[in-house]
Image: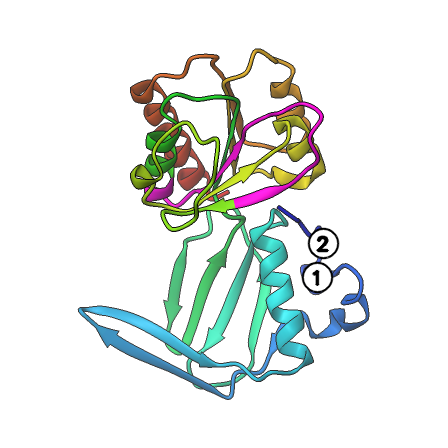
């Protein structure tokens, strides 16, 4: 998995510095022209549709959102339903996921929830499915020492040799990293909404997870399904309450 790190929003929240080659376009990062914004109602739910122009401001705007999903500070995307330019601002503590006031819609954009599993885990597919159903990205570091950092995206239609369970049991996307979890996390694979399930004998992984900014690391060489799902649920609830 390749990550792109962006510099944080400045103290005033007025500019979002971007990595090369987007640094010269930072003045566009908080403004994106949406000439057409519509709201559709389907099955009692509102859906917002925007027309995004294929131009440089759009590319910069989307790159900022992408960097946020990868672990940069949370932002709020302000969408004017009358079609005027959308903007980004720094998120406050305990920011609601969605706010609407007249013609202004505020959407909280946070780093994606991520579960990194390390080592050989008997119930890896069941634990991964439980996490996926709660909105987590699921990454499995199989941990073969000496291998290069490589990745596969595993799905029910993707044959992958060496998995410890039948492919027919896999009903969700899971990224498989053929590298040690410590290398993956140290290389930018962890952020403040990342949970680490460490099923290896290397307890130092907890320190790597902490230094990488991960929310929590569960050291358990033999993780049981019920205990692990409860840990995931508690962490998910805490992350939700803190608005992280």
Question: Which residue shows up at 63% across the image and 39% down it?
Answer: 189
Badge 2, how many Cα within 10 Å: few under 14, some, many 20+?
Answer: many
> Is 199 covered by the magenta stretch?
no
The quadrant where residue 210 appears: top right
Left or right: residue 77 versus residue 210 is left
Label 1: which secondary element: loop
> Is 138 covered by the magenta stretch?
yes
Viewer-proximal residue among 96 and 222? 222
Residue 81 image point, x, y percent? 42, 80
The quadrant where residue 66 appears: bottom right
Residue 29 image point, x, y percent? 67, 70
Nearest to viewer (mark 1 / mark 2):
2
- Count of numbered circles on the image: 2
Report the span colored magenta: 132-152
Question: Which residue shows up at 44% across the image and 37% down it?
Answer: 239
Q: Give the residue at the far left of this rendering.
A: 43
Badge 1, how many Cα within 10 Å: few under 14, some, many 20+?
Answer: many
Q: Name the colouring of the figure.
A: rainbow
Residue 131 image point, x, y percent? 38, 37
Q: Is residue 195 above or below residue 13?
A: above
Label 2: which secondary element: loop
Question: Which residue shows up at 67% across the image and 24% down it?
Answer: 208
Kindly indicate whether the residue at mark 2 contacts the one at mark 1 (C-beta within 8 angstroms). yes
Circle 1 sits on which residue? Answer: 16
Q: Which mark is residue 6?
A: 2
Viewer-proximal residue among 52 and 44? 52
User: What is the C-alpha distance between the residues marked 1 and 2?
Assistant: 8 Å
Left or right: residue 138 versus residue 171 is right
């Amino acid at each position: 998995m390749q990550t792109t790190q962006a510099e944080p929003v400045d103290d005033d929240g007025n500019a979002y510095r971007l990595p090369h080659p987007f640094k010269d376009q930072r003045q566009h990062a908080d403004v994106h022209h949406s000439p057409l914004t519509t709201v559709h109602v389907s099955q009692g739910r509102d859906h917002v549709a925007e027309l995004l122009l294929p131009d440089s401001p759009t590319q910069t705007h989307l790159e900022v959102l992408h960097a946020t999903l990868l672990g940069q500070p949370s932002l709020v995307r302000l969408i004017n339903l009358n079609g005027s330019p959308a903007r980004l601002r720094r998120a406050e503590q305990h920011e609601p996921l969605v706010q609407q006031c007249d013609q202004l819609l505020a959407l909280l954009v946070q780093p994606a929830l991520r579960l990194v599993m390390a080592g050989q885990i008997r119930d890896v597919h069941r634990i991964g499915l439980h996490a996926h159903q709660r909105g987590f990205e699921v990454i499995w570091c199989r941990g073969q020492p000496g291998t290069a950092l490589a990745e596969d995206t595993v799905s029910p239609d993707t044959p992958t040799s060496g998995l410890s369970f039948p492919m027919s049991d896999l009903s969700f996307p899971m990224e498989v990293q053929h590298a040690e979890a410590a290398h993956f996390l140290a290389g930018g694979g962890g952020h403040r909404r990342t949970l680490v399930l460490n099923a290896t004998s290397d307890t130092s992984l907890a320190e790597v997870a902490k230094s990488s900014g991960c929310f929590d690391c569960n050291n358990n060489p033999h993780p049981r399904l019920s205990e692990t799902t409860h840990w995931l649920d508690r962490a998910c609830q805490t992350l939700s309450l803190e608005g992280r």
